[in-house]
Amino acid sequence: MFFAAFVQGLALGLGLIVAIGAQNAFVLRQGLRREHVGSVIAFCALTDALLIAAGVMGMAQALAESAGVARVLALAGAAFLSFYGFQALRRARRSHQLQAAPGGAALSHRTAVAQAAAFSLLNPHVYLDTVLLVGSIGARQPADSRWCFVLGASTASLLWFGLLGLGARWLAPWFARPRAWQVLDVLTGLTMCALAGLLLRHLGNGS
């Protein structure tokens, strides 16, 4: 039960975070420049972990107080996951790539962390993904498994940002290939659709 919750959180976290975006490009850029990489990775991963934990625990309280809220959130979560999965599969049909130009002036440690904060906290999708979506799904885990789910989802963020930052020089040519992102989009789409089905099954079982 604990391992299953961890894996579900890990899969959901990876599915949501593996996408082309400004935050990923910034982490990749810092990795290419080898500037304050550890601090940037730590800040982004810790921010995700705190938001995920707050979402799961807050949603758990809301779900405990109202069965109707639990059902609505479960249906909304399944719908969002299905839509997200469909969008990823649709995106896989088009060519796109992640590029982070390593040029430009060097950033101070404070500026690098400030920019990481901006990319992490000023994007509304961050709250939709971590607090609402991950929170509502994690809150439906058994009470003694919720922290395993949080750990799994948080581990996904740490692994991804660590891969981008520490492996930037090796990964940059790979991320610049549209085919690589098409494969990732297919995997993301299938994962999201599978998680939506799992959420609906749990809802049908009343768990």
Image (tube, rainbow, N blue to C red):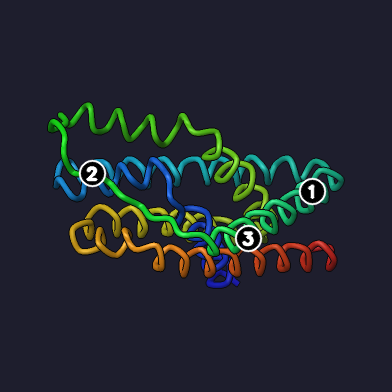
- Measured along the vertical axis of the image, is residue 97 above or below residue 202? above
Q: Earlier in the sequence, mark 1 or mark 3?
A: 1
The mark lying in front, picked from 2 and 3, is 2
* Spatial CA span between label 2 and label 1: 44 Å
Q: Which residue is mark 1?
A: 70
Q: Is residue 124 above or below residue 140?
A: above
Q: Residue at x 21, y 49 (%)?
A: 31
Three-letter amino acid code at the position of disc 1: Ala
Q: Which residue is tagged 3?
A: 85
The percent position of residue 130, horizontal first and vertical second, equals 55, 45
Going by the image, does 165 lie left or right of 158? left
Give the mark nearer the N terminus: 2 vs 1. Answer: 1
85 or 115, nearer to the observer: 85
Question: What amino acid is found at the position of numbered circle 2 in the picture?
Answer: Ala
Q: Which residue matches tag 2?
A: 101
Q: Label 3 is placed on what type of residue?
A: Gly
Say which quarter of the image contains residue 2. bottom right
